[in-house]
Image: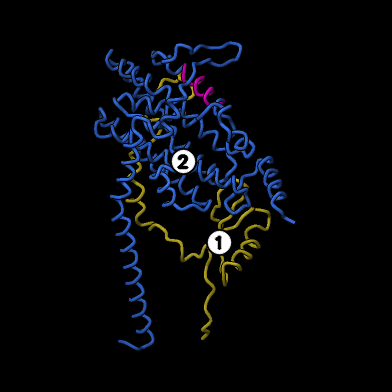
Amino acid sequence: MDNIENLATRFQERIDAGEKIEPKDWMPEKYRKTHIRQISQHAHSEIVGMLPEGNWITRAPSLKRKLGLLAKVQDEAGHGLYLYSAAETLGISRDEMTQQLLTGKAKYSSIFNYPTLTWADIGAIGWLVDGAAIINQVMLTRTSFGPYARAMVRICKEESFHQRQGYEIMLTLCNGTPEQKEMAQDALNRTWWPALMMFGPRDEDSPNTKQSMAWKIKRKTNDELRQQFVDITVPQAEFLGLKMPDPEIKWNEERGHYDFGAIDWDEFWQVVKGNGPCNKERIAARQKAWDDGQWVRDAALAYSAKKSENEEKSNGIKAQRSEGKIA
Amino acid sequence: MSNKKEWPLFEIFIRSKNGLEHRHAGSLHAADPTMALENARDVYTRRQEGVSIWVVESKDIHASNPEQAGELFEPAKDKVYRHPTFYELPIELKHI
């Protein structure tokens, strides 16, 4: 007989064998819930992430930069859509997810609660924030839930231009006037630590990590991913001629990794809890978009209803005509 | 003249392997979705081509008009800035 324990054992065996789980497969309730939480949080991050960058579209310094940034923000809307759709396969509706975001029940990446003060921030975001996101997302292309993994493959393919776009902005600024280079340095200084926080709490403070690894929701721990990011990024900063805003960053020959300083976790938790510089502004912007869009959603439904009503009417007339009831 | 209705057409989508998406395999006629699934099993997965089947009644699929392909898809042609190669970075740079 298929009791819950047998099902759970069989489920774990499938995961261990590297099989993907699909929406109609049996899954433990916690696996479903964890995915709804994680995928919707990921989707919300894509959507809220459009706000800090959208801030600079009208003020991009050239047409080329404007087109690049516009295309990037447009991609993020698309990525949000792929992810919302993946979450919907687990039995939550789009409107429910939106409400969870607006009421603060669902979170999004805390990096988007920081302001974009200068044009260089757009460069730093592409380079560092997208860089950190890519490391996480490349891992997630091998996650155990099929729709999520497939959405990630698509996203990673599209994402590759985002980081190059950002780094090219940084490179241009660093090869420019001393003021421009200073602006790039300032953006790195402000973005670095929040970018490191994107990987989430330390492994010892992350109670879900063990289960997430066992279910192959995650394939690497927060600290492993963070280290990978530091190792990749430090040489890239050196190439720009910028100074890392962490005096403790140093190559450790023995470990084969860069050592780096302690993260201010109080700041992280403050921002997660809603007290970051832009939390209120971001949610207010999403609330406004939701409210202002209400008449558009209503109008589209009204139009659709009217159209099918007209079709029914004309089909009725055709039927009567063919039966010879009317001329 | 027969007044019997013709069976509707169904489009068949097959997931070839665990982890992959369903892809369109072809179509067949059936009296209802259950029969469509059974027949799709017999027609399209005789040699273990699939691990999962979707059937969708053809009339429920709305397709773009091939005559409009130009206006639909050409605008993406000159948007080179959507591709990574548009952004010029030195080759000695790694992992980017």
Q: Which region of the structure is painted magenta?
A: A224-234
Q: Which mark is residue A41?
A: 2
Identify the chain drawn in yellow: B
Indicate the quadrant containing the N terminus of chain A: top left, top right, bottom left or bottom right: bottom right
Q: Residue at x 54, y 46 (%)?
A: A147
Q: Residue at x 41, y 42 (%)?
A: A104
Is A258 above or below relative to B60?
Answer: above
| Quadrant of the frame with the C terminus of chain A | bottom left
Q: Is residue A280 above or below residue A305?
A: above
Residue B27 relative to residue A302: left or right: right
**Amino acid on which the number 2 mark rests in the picture:** Gln
Q: Position of residue A239 (x, y in %)?
A: 42, 15
Q: Secondary structure at mark 1?
A: strand
| Picture coordinates of residue A299, whole percent (x, y) | 29, 59
| Residue position for label 1 | B55
Marks 1/2: CA–CA distance: 32 Å
Q: How many marks?
A: 2
